[in-house]
Amino acid sequence: MREITLSQAVNEAIAEEMRRDPTTFLIGEDVAEAGTPFKVLAGLADEFGTERVIDTPIAEPGFMGIAVGAALTGSRPIVDLMFGDFIYLIMDQLCNQAAKAYYMSGGKLNVPLVLRTNLGATRRSAAQHSQSLHALVAHIPGLKVAMPSSAYEAKGLMKTAIRDNNPVVIFEDKLMYNDKAPVPEEEYLIPFGEAHVKREGTDITLIATSSMVQVCEAAAEMLAAEGISAEVIDPRTIVPLDEATLIASAKKTSRVIVVDEGHQSYGITGEIAGRINEKAFYHLDAPVLRMGAMDVPVPFSPALEDITVPTPEGVAENARKLMSGEMIHAA
Amino acid sequence: MADTKTNTEDYMRMYRQMVRIRVFEDNANQLYLSAKMPGLTHMYSGEEAVAVGICEALTDDDRITSTHRGHGHCVAKGADYKQMFCELLGKEEGYCRGKGGSMHIADQSHGNLGANAIVGGSMGIATGSALSSKLQGSDDVTVCFFGDGATAQGLLYEVMNMAALWHLPVIYACENNGYSEYTKTEEIAAGSITARAEAFGIEAFTVDGQDVLAVNDLTQKLVARARKGEGPFFVELLTYRYHGHHVGDINRAYYREKEEETIWKESRDPIVNFGKWLSEEGIASAEDLKTMEDEIRAEAKQAVDYALAAKYPDESEVDMHVFAPTDPATLRPGA
Ligand SMILES: Cc1ncc(C[n+]2csc(CCOP(=O)(O)OP(=O)(O)O)c2C)c(N)n1
Ligand SMILES: [Mg+2]
């Protein structure tokens, strides 16, 4: 199968859906001629024109609000938010307006809108350009949240997001834009709420999102060499969450580590660990571990930044501890 | 050029500060291109007269807020090369102990409240700093630097309204360099920029941002008036950035003509033109200026070498400074 980059995959998905549905349009800062600073949208303005690939001033709440209004009235906007960190600027439009319109109108109005943005540290971009803020929006009922872990997921999830009748937030890892993966030529969509078992195993389950899937695959490889069989599962969407697959795996292996790049406290890892605790407790041989980013603003200095995020070595080490029973009485 | 400051020392300091910015940026650019500097950075070269003309009209107690393109403001407000280069390289001795980097660089001890990676992110901060001056009965003035692109942020209009209602000692300094990332200003800003401030009854001015004396003259007058409670003010400074939007923005012909860059560099350079004026007025010979520049370049080289060899923060610093300590004694009832 051909291999393309995550960036190309996103570009293809959007182009295909824009060809398919004339009510779709793209809106954001420097999306048209520049194709975004990451060049992900390069060429789309040539094909669809600047009527449907719309450059905006640096006015995030403004263009987000305009997109919500357009979505309420027959359009299907794809909003480009240059950095995930800017989500704070649009929180009212996203969480008070887009997320609640369907519910508050008793099902009479809906907001078919995609917000594509990014996450991920270790790019030396400091505290305001490195955050992974998906937990903030996953907390709000009415928003769906997708987290592609490779080019394949990026394409399939984006196409589903554009056809979904609700506001969907997609977080791409900005360090993965140039990573290649096999992506079929023929059309495919990835349904929301279907986890993907990336690697089967019997001793321990590693549940991971976005780039942490790669981290856990590397950890699983290290563990395999030591005779520990790790299963790696990518939920792909955290809202909706494919609880059944996660619980089944937890029951099978009896040990779970949840790995995510958001801050560990009050984050995705705690939520998933909580659900496993509730529904697989009597099958567990060890406490469910959470591994998130450290609870600190992301520091600029490479010497500090690299220790704030989970690594394959760190995951493997915790897996070993769970296997040896060392953490059962850790408290 | 406007002949306003009569003090030779002041002229020479302004020239010196502009050269210090240019030389700092040359070195930062080099560090980045040779992969010695991590992250992303935005060069201030070409806009030196703006930061220097304004900051030379301020005292150490006056405050500024800066932007993603913040090295120039930092130098102009009195920062030291060594600690700045250490910050750029993420070293422990940097102004922010390596935690901030290029986009958050600031010498806090000289009244710099921080560079900001969020466009428009400092408008509230600058206005709040001016409110502090008023509440505390001090006559300190705050200057809020931001770009033309940042005028699209709604926050500006909320805070200008309050600043005008409350007569706050703040000067909104809009550095109009003609571009907002890869887009020309006229494509992202409808109508007149100064009229935005005037709508709130704020006196607004447009000044040649390549003319350090014109910038300094205007700022001195406005600062004096702001100290007396006649603020706020708004200044649009017409200027130009020589490099790309960020250091990686090399192929930019699709949004900006090479010819345009050449014209600004060759005929409007704030340092060259001020240098010529200094010679014409007999204040400093071309030779004097060259000697000064050589000294600054030597100082920069030393600072860069120092920073390259300096140590990174210890790993234990990673969760230091998340919360500021509060003295428990202050928490007792009746304390
Ligand atoms: C809220 C926010 N939106 C977008 C960006 C990305 N960005 C960084 S600089 C910039 C352009 C700023 O233009 P301007 O204000 O004119 O300043 P200049 O870069 O020209 O100095 C943009 C869009 C950002 N950092 N913050
Ligand atoms: Mg600008």
Image (tube, grey):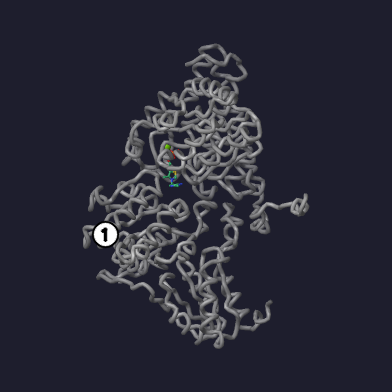
Q: Give the x, y percent position of residue B237.
A: 45, 28
Q: Give the x, y percent position of residue B319.
A: 65, 58
Where A231 falls versus B8 (above or below)? below
Where B41 falls versus A253 (above or below)? above
Q: Does residue A35 appear in the picture of this structure?
A: no
Q: What residue type is labelled 1?
A: Ala
- Ligand 2 quarter of the rendering: top left
The residue that appears at 48% across and 74% down in the rendered structure is A217
Where B3 falls versus A280 (above or below)? above
The residue that appears at 40% across and 64% down in the rendered structure is A143
**Chain to which the residue tagged by mark 1 belongs:** A
Q: Give the x, y percent position of residue B14.
A: 57, 24
Tag 1 residue: A15
Nearest the eye: A35 or B196? B196
Q: Residues within 10 Å of mark 1 (few under 14, many from 20)?
A: some
Where B112 falls versus A139 (above or below)? above
Q: Give the x, y percent position of residue B49.
A: 50, 27
